Image (spheres, rainbow, N blue to C red):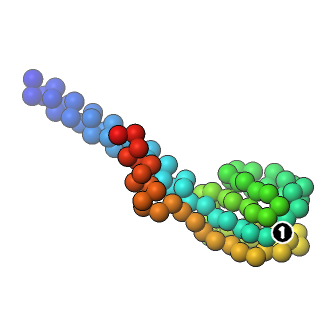
Amino acid sequence: MEKSVCKRDRKDRRVDDETKKREIEKINTNNWVEIEGKFDIEKLNNLFGNHFSNRKVKYDAKLVKIWNTNNEQIANIVRSLVELDFPIFRVEHKKENLEDIFLELTKEL
C-alpha cells in the first residue's frame, strides 16, 4: 500500500510541475515591446507578413506591439521600420507587474 501512495505522490508532483511550467510559459507571454511611431498599415502588413510572421504582432497607424521577442529581434524590427522611413517616437519593453500576475493566478481560486 505504501508503494502505491509513493507512486501517486510522484504523479501528483509531476502534474504540479507541469502546471507550474504552463503558468510560467503563460507569464512569459505577458512580455511585449511597444514601438510608437507614425506607420503606414499597408507597409506594416508587408513587413510583418514577410519577415516576422512567426511573432504575435498587433499594430495600427500609431503603435506596434510585439510579444515574445529578444533584444536582437527588436533591433531588427526597429531597423526595418526605420528603413521604411517610419518616424519612431518610442521603443519600450513592457511586462505585467507581479500584482497583475498574482491576481491572474489567484482569480480562479
* Residue closest to the eye, 39 or 6: 39
Percent position (x, y) of residue 15?
A: 33, 36
The residue singled out by tag 1 in the image is: 38
Asked if 88 appears above or below 34 in the picture, the reply is below
Outermost residue, left side: 2
Q: Does residue 96 appear left or right of residue 65 in this picture?
A: left
The answer to which quarter of the image holds residue 91 is: bottom right
Residue at figure coordinates x 85%, y 65% from the top left: 39
Residue at figure coordinates x 60%, y 57% from the top left: 68
Outermost residue, top side: 1
Q: Does residue 31 appear left or right of residue 52 in this picture?
A: left
Percent position (x, y) of residue 42?
A: 90, 55
> Does dot 1 land on a helix, a strand or a loop?
loop
Q: Does residue 67 appear left or right of residue 95 in this picture?
A: right
Residue at figure coordinates x 78%, y 74% from the top left: 88
Asked if 71 appears above or below 28 in the picture, the reply is below
